[in-house]
């Protein structure tokens, strides 16, 4: 993705000079949508903890604040045109813009709060939530809406391998009651639940439990039975599961590591991933490769844009073709909410890398955050959403800048290859520490070493998916090349995971988060220092001169008799720089 970013920037911009590319990251950022995104996010998080009554109060306060700021930002002649007032100095444009920005932020946050009120009322009046409060035994019919994810540990029956999947309730039978409602559950079950596919209608038996505060689900179902298939997905919903199965079968002849890792890196299917390889990828920060993340979507979108510009298509046509291709990729891997979020964040990352304009890219990121929270405020309290936003924000703010720094000592493709994972890791590390305390010593270097192999796996594996049903031979050729690269990624993970000090202990809670944030700042300063030695030397000399100017050496010190030894004073007097 990193090499694609620089090549795409040249193609998209019409071949601008390298100096212009270096100067672009220094342009002024547009921060007008930042307050709106932050306030909307805060309202979304508050909606997962506050009851509906308090949310109504919060929404009313935000509406009043929005009216106040927008009214204050309106010139007095437009407020009361019939009243003559003495002439005053015109309002400063910056102050007017700030008030309008705050008014818009409060209005959007009120919209998020209103959506939260609706969800809160439904949740408080949900019969399923009442059954979960009583820990009732129930039989539920559900429709799978998410991709199963591994949890580890043991279930009630002692079986290894616990899985969680997000579902939508269709029918609940418990305590002689038959309930039909549109509620969201998380099912936790044994290994058979790993085969659940989005769009399937399943029937399961288990105990309903209350969800923890801050979780978007109405309740949790601890399944005590295997899922019974009531109805298979039909139409476009069946396409992702069919292609995943075809990819799993086509890669079965590869070595074990490659056969298990290839479907995970292309479609997020980790059913065949070996447990020891999955455990090796955790301490080196490579587990994101086994999920459809923004990096996958960025690679697909960037490659399509580069291909379209190579064919000399106009910018609007190239952008439309690339977005259509990304939509097909999302449909192939499954239009889960996490995949849609990753596609949106990946598109913003490509815009940031291709244009090099941090201000515009930051505005796109804020619009994406606001739009996603307006559609589903429950995203605001999820770690996946937080990490996606932080990684994209790091690429937007620091990706091009760090690449321009490193370009003084490294070739541009290598500088870009280092800057993207580094900028994302600097922003994500404090949040990762809050989720899982520990310091991955080799996370950055492992991702950099594996980066040349990640792009072929994603692109060739994705290209093989539509080819397998219609041209089996060509699909197997692509699978062979992608499988070799996937094996290299697995080898990198195993090598660094087996190195001494792969995972170091780290403080938990706020001290750990603060220490990791400080570590990120120091790392950024270290990168700047090694790429700007002349500027560092100049600042050291200035600091030395400042200290020397305040030292008592060579001067008459009050309270100390002066023996008049001018020779000694002249010999120890330091010349100012």
Image: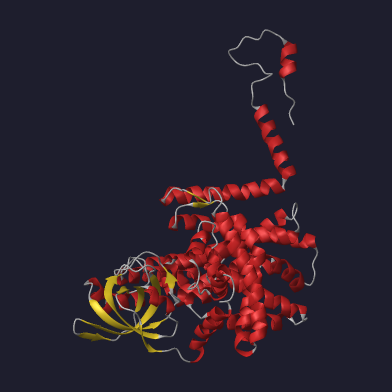
Res 449 → quadrant: bottom right
Viewer can see residue 232: yes
- Vertical order, 420 against 232 (above or below): above
Residue located 77% across and 62% down the image: 20
Q: How is the image coloured?
A: secondary structure
Res 355 → quadrant: bottom right
Give residue 297's position: percent from left, percent from top.
60, 74
In-image side of 108 versus 297 (left or right) = left
Give residue 294's position: percent from left, percent from top.
57, 70
Residue located 54% across and 53% down the image: 498
In-image side of 388 versus 30 (left or right) = left
What is the number of callouts on the image?
0
Give residue 285's position: percent from left, percent from top.
54, 59
Viewer can see residue 99: no
Q: Residue furthest top?
A: 563
Q: Residue furthest bottom?
A: 235
Res 152 → quadrant: bottom left
């Amino acid at each position: 993705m990193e090499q694609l970013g620089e090549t795409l920037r040249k193609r998209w911009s019409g071949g601008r000079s390298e100096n212009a590319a270096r100067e672009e990251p220094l342009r002024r950022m547009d921060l007008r949508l930042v307050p709106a995104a932050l306030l909307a996010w805060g309202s979304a998080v508050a909606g997962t903890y506050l009851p509906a009554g308090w949310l109504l109060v919060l929404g009313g306060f935000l509406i009043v604040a929005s009216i106040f700021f927008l009214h204050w930002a309106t010139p007095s002649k437009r407020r009361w045109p019939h009243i003559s007032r003495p002439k005053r100095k015109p309002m400063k444009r910056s102050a007017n813009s700030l008030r309008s920005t705050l008014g818009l932020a409060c209005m959007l946050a009120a919209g998020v709060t209103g959506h939260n009120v609706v969800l809160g009322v439904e949740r408080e009046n949900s019969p399923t939530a009442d059954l979960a409060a009583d820990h009732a035994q129930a039989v539920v019919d559900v429709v799978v809406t998410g991709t199963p994810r591994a949890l580890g540990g043991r279930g009630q029956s002692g079986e290894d391998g616990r899985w969680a999947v997000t579902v939508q309730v269709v029918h609940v039978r418990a305590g002689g009651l038959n309930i039909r409602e549109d509620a969201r559950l998380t099912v936790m079950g044994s290994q058979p639940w790993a085969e659940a596919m989005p769009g399937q209608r399943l029937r399961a038996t288990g105990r309903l439990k209350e969800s923890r505060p801050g979780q978007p689900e109405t309740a949790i179902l601890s399944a005590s039975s295997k899922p019974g298939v009531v109805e298979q997905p039909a139409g476009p919903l069946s396409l992702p599961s069919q292609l995943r199965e075809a990819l799993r079968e086509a890669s079965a002849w590869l070595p074990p590591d490659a056969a298990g890792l290839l479907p995970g890196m292309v479609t997020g299917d980790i059913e065949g991933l070996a447990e020891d390889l999955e455990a090796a990828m955790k301490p080196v920060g490579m587990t994101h490769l086994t999920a459809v993340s923004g990096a996958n979507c960025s690679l697909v979108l960037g490659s399509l844009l580069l291909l379209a510009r190579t064919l000399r298509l106009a910018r609007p046509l190239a952008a439309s073709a690339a977005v259509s291709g990304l939509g097909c990729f999302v449909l192939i891997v499954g239009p889960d909410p996490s995949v849609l979020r990753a596609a949106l964040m990946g598109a913003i990352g490509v815009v940031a890398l291709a244009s090099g304009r941090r201000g515009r890219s930051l505005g796109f990121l804020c619009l994406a955050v606001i739009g996603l929270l307006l559609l589903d405020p429950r995203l605001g309290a999820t770690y996946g959403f937080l990490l996606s936003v932080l990684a994209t924000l790091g690429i937007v703010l620091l990706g091009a800048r760090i690449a321009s720094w490193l370009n003084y000592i490294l070739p541009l493709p290598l500088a870009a290859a280092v800057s993207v994972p580094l900028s994302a890791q600097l922003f994500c590390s404090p949040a990762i520490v809050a989720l899982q305390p520990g310091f991955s010593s080799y996370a950055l270097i492992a991702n950099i070493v594996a980066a040349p192999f990640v792009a072929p796996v994603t692109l060739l594996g994705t290209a093989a998916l539509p080819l397998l049903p219609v041209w089996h031979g060509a699909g197997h050729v692509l699978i062979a090349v992608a499988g070799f690269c996937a094996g290299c990624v697995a080898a990198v993970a195993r090598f660094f995971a087996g190195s001494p000090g792969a995972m170091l202990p780290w403080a938990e809670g706020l001290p750990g988060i603060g220490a990791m944030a400080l570590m990120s700042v120091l790392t950024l300063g270290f990168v700047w220092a090694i790429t700007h030695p002349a500027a560092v030397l100049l600042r050291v000399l200035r600091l030395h001169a400042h200290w020397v100017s305040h030292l008592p050496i060579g001067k008459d010190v009050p309270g100390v008799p002066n023996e008049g030894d001018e020779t000694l004073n002249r010999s120890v007097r330091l010349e100012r720089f």
